[in-house]
Image: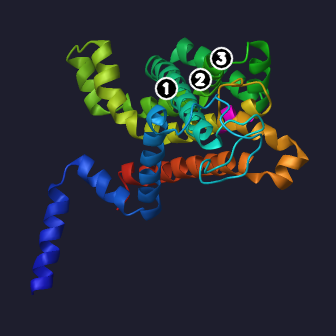
């Protein structure tokens, strides 16, 4: 009887919980995602406070050339004597900045175009969607490489390139949701009541589209970080002496580094893998937690 009463109380608590509490409860069931979130918080804090916790200036020559890991230099030194651990902390900062800013830019562009196309339809929908289809018809990596070769390599160039290339998927996602929402009774009642367009779009439709946008944005964030690393590795992204995970891997082109100096390429390579996998796990858990049909 006690167990039955306890189960009934638990069911009542679930019924009475708010939407955010429901999302949080569902998210906690994904143990791998919860661990990934903790890892992201720790790594994000390390990147944010890099100037305070880095043992050395990332661009200062402080040790021997290509020195192996030691008590003084935990991850060794690079080819010109800079501390690898310090550069890794600052490189993670750059990679996260590129990923977050590029995701914000692409999300804003995609949401605005998706709202316009889905709500107004007609000629606006046709023009926006045909332009979206045209952008998506180009091979993604080729489009990024061409844009990177046209503009001067640098941090903000990469952020803007990735931001203006990653928006089509979000635009199509938002348009599809808006097409469904604009036919619902609560939107039609707002139209009949004479509510302003800005209220309908940003206070009624957009909040009901946030969940899929958040899930999709996590994949864009991971992809942007991978793209930055690839472009920097090829010498078309963040330029030395500024450290990024991609240009730290650039030294791995040498067979000597690959075989005899793993401390120069294993830490940035592992960090890229950990960051991208953690972001993807969190995105998968968010998708399930925000799904209204999920139990």
The answer, for residue 65, to whether it is visible in the render is yes
In the depicted structure, whether residue 50 falls above or below residue 165: below
Q: Which residue is mark 3?
A: 157
The answer, for residue 140, to whether it is visible in the render is no
Reply yes or no: does residue 119 show up in magenta: no
- What residue is drawn where x is 63% and y is 46%? 272
Magenta stretch, overall SS: helix
Residue projecting furthest to the right = 255
Query: Which mark sits nearer the N-terminus, 3 or 1?
Result: 1
Q: Which residue is mark 1?
A: 104
Q: Which residue is mark 2?
A: 163
- Tell me whether the residue at label 3 lies in contact with that at label 2, contact meaning CB atoms closer than 8 angstroms: no
Q: Mark 2 and mark 1: span between their CA atoms?
A: 7 Å
The tag on residue 156 is none
- Where is residue 72? Give x, y as percent: 60, 48
Quarter in which the C terminus is drawn? bottom left
Query: Which mark sits nearer the N-terminus, 2 or 1?
Result: 1
Quarter in which the N terminus is drawn? bottom left
Q: Quadrant of residue 224?
A: top right
- Tell me whether the residue at label 2 lies in contact with that at label 1, contact meaning CB atoms closer than 8 angstroms: yes
């Amino acid at each position: 009887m006690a167990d039955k009463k306890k189960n009934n109380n638990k069911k009542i608590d679930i019924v009475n919980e708010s939407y955010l509490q429901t999302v949080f409860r569902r998210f906690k069931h994904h143990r791998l995602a919860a661990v990934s979130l903790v890892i992201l918080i720790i790594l994000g804090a390390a990147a944010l406070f890099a100037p305070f916790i880095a043992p050395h200036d990332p661009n200062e020559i402080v040790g021997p050339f290509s020195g192996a890991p030691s008590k003084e230099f935990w991850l060794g030194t690079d080819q010109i004597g800079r501390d690898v651990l310090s550069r890794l902390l600052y490189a993670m900062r750059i990679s996260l900045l590129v990923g977050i800013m590029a995701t914000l830019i692409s999300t804003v562009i995609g949401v605005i175009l998706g709202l316009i196309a889905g709500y107004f339809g007609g000629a606006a929908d046709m023009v926006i969607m045909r332009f979206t289809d045209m952008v998506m018809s180009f091979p993604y990596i080729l489009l990024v490489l061409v844009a990177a070769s046209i503009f001067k390599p640098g941090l903000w160039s990469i952020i803007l390139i990735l931001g203006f290339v990653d928006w089509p998927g979000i635009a199509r996602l938002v348009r599809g949701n808006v097409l469904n929402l604009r036919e619902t009774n609560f939107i039609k009642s707002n139209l009949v009541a004479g509510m302003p367009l800005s209220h309908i779009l940003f206070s009624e439709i957009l909040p009901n589209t946030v969940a899929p946008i958040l899930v999709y944005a996590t994949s864009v964030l991971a992809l942007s970080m991978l793209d930055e690393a690839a472009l920097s590795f090829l010498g078309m992204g963040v330029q030395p002496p500024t450290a990024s995970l991609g240009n730290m891997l650039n030294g791995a082109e040498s067979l000597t580094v690959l075989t005899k100096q793993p401390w120069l390429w294993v830490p940035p390579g592992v960090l890229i893998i950990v960051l991208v996998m953690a972001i993807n796990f969190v995105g998968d858990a968010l998708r399930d937690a925000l799904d209204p049909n999920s139990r």
